Amino acid sequence: MHIAPSDARGKPLGKFLPAQSRIVQDTTLIPQVNELYRNKYGLVYRLMNLMNRFRYSKTGESVFLNHSLLVDPLSCKNSLQLRG
C-alpha cells in the first residue's frame, strides 16, 4: 500500500510513499491507542465511539491499524513537500 500526508478530509498534501499496515493485536496497547485518539480528537472521537456502540452493538470491538513506511521519508527528496 501507499500512504501520504493529508488534510482532515483526506486530500493528499504530498507524495505517496510505500508502507505496510498491520492490525494491532496486543490487547495491552488498545487502551493506550484509545487514549491517544481521545487526546487528539476529543469530543469528536467520543461521539464517534458512542455512535459506533449503537450501530455495531453485536461486535463492540474497535480495530486499530499500525502503519509503517517502507522507505526513509528523508531519503526521498521532495516526497513530503506540502502542496500549496
Image (spheres, helix red, strand yellow):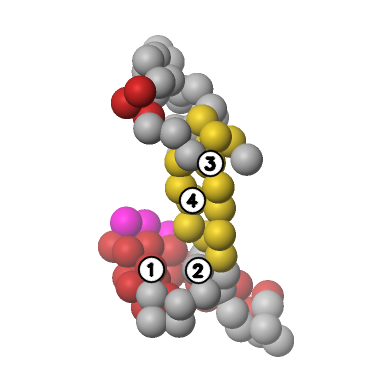
C-alpha gap between disc 2 and disc 1: 9 Å
Task: Please tell me the numbered disc located at residue 33.
Answer: 1
| Total numbered labels placed on residues in the image | 4
Point out the stretch of residues depicted in magenta. Answer: 40-44
Frontmost of labels 1 and 3 is 3
Tell me which numbered mark, 4 or 1, is placed earlier along the sequence: 1
| Foreground of the two, 14 or 59 | 14
C-alpha gap between disc 4 and disc 1: 13 Å
Say which quadrant the C terminus sits in.
Answer: top left
Q: Are marks 2 and 1 in contact (CB under 8 Å)?
A: yes
| Foreground of the two, 55 or 71 | 71
Tell me which numbered mark, 1 or 3, is placed earlier along the sequence: 3
The x and y percentages for residue 75 are 35, 23
Query: Which residue bears the numbered disc 4?
Result: 67
C-alpha gap between disc 1 and disc 3: 20 Å
Residue drawn at x 63%, y 79% is: 54
Q: Are marks 1 and 3 in contact (CB under 8 Å)?
A: no
Query: Which residue bears the numbered disc 2?
Result: 24
Q: Are marks 4 and 3 in contact (CB under 8 Å)?
A: yes
Tell me which amino acid carries mark 4: His
The x and y percentages for residue 69 are 46, 41
